[in-house]
Image: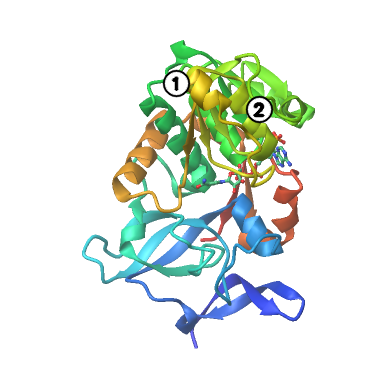
Amino acid sequence: MATFKAWVVEKSEGGQSLSFQDFDESGLMDGDVTVRITHSGLNYKDDLAMTSKMPVVRRFPMIPGIDFCGVIEGSNDPAWKSGDTVVLTGWGVGETHLGGFAERARVKGGWLVPLPDGLSPAQAMAIGTAGYTAMLSMIVLEKHGLTPQTGPAIVTGASGGVGSVAVSLLKRAGWHVIAATGREGETDYLKRLGAAEILDRAELAGDPKPLAKERWAAGIDAVGSKTLANLLAMTKGGGAIAACGNAGGMDLPSSVAPFILRGVSLIGINSVTTPQQPRREAWARLAKELDLDALAEMTETVGLKDVGDLAETILAGQTRGRTVVEIG
Ligand code: NDP
């Protein structure tokens, strides 16, 4: 019986259990491409899946890990051949389809993108779903017509994965970046990534007014809830906020005032099912535009067997930036 090492979430009497196992290869799900995974990344959703704090896992047993990079071992998809190095983010991997915290995966060829020129597999997973989401967010703000000349950009959850990459990308593109964080101790870190100003996230946590003093033209929000409502109330006329996360809650206690009185736009980001063309465009831009020294600064690396022990830390806000899982 061929097996590979994997973290596995199973249904148990108490709800869910997580264990590091030898997983039987015959248990891999349908797909036309088999990948030897070399790297994965630890994302917020993975921690929700591993700790069962939210019902992220919708098939049991499940291998968590919503993204991975690896080398193709076998392909029935003419678009791919053995030896190709590929990147996967989203498509329900780690939620409804066996995921990346493992030595093997079998997936649909249409879910994959080639490793972008200029990035190593480790760098691709240092970017991971979080960094790719930050780039999708920056792209929608640009498509809205916003530029560094239209005013500052705010990033919430700034010391987290999405936030750290967003700060760095926006700075590189010429924006004056305001980084909102709850961690005073990360001020120097955020300034090294490119933040021009640090805002205590407590200032965005109060009950939102319909409108407040205009402070920024653009924003990338990883937090949601009152934070997002306050962001909208403080956005300049014609500005836009890209909403990509819910680290602070799923609700949105806002009003229509920013939309109808200031023409503010709220743009949603869903990285999971982004079609191939914008997906490849985002990865190509990340390879070209992200400061790789900044990426190294925001990245820690752990081994596959350590992932389970880290499950609680990201949700407790104890990790900063990105965590790469080295597997190969
Ligand atoms: P991280 O845990 O790395 O970062 C989240 C950050 O949010 C924390 O570092 C913290 O930043 C801040 N934060 C945490 N809890 C709270 C709170 N209660 N109130 C206010 N701020 C808080 O997660 P990621 O960056 O990987 O993901 C961020 C969010 O984006 C998650 O909700 C995730 O699910 C979502 N996401 C969505 C995607 C999509 O396709 N739409 C794709 C990827 C991620 P600080 O300490 O600096 O304040």
Q: CA distance from mark 2 to mark 1?
A: 25 Å
Question: Looking at the picture, which amino acid does disc 1 mark?
Answer: Ala
Q: Is residue 73 left or right of residue 201?
A: left
Secondary structure under badge 2?
Answer: helix
Instruction: Please rate how many residues cluster around mark 2, counting C-alpha atoms within 10 Å: few if below 14, some from 14 to 19, many from 20.
Output: many
Q: Residue at x 69, y 25 (%)?
A: 209
Q: Which residue is mark 2?
A: 230
Q: Which residue is mark 1?
A: 173
Q: Position of residue 115 (x, y in %)?
A: 37, 48
Q: Residue at x 60, y 51 (%)?
A: 43
Instruction: Compare residues 104 and 156 and report the one nearer the observer.
Output: 156
Q: Quadrant of residue 223?
A: top right
Mark 1 neighbour class, 10 Å CA radius: few under 14, some 14 to 19, many 20 or more? few
Comparing 91 with 116, the one in front is 91
Look at discs 2 and 1 and give the one toward the viewer: 2
**Does dot 1 land on a helix, a strand or a loop?**
loop
Q: Is residue 133 above or below residue 183?
A: below
Q: Is residue 275 visible?
A: yes
The label on residue 289 is: none
Question: Which amino acid type is marked by label 2?
Answer: Asn
Disc nearer the start of the sequence (2/1): 1
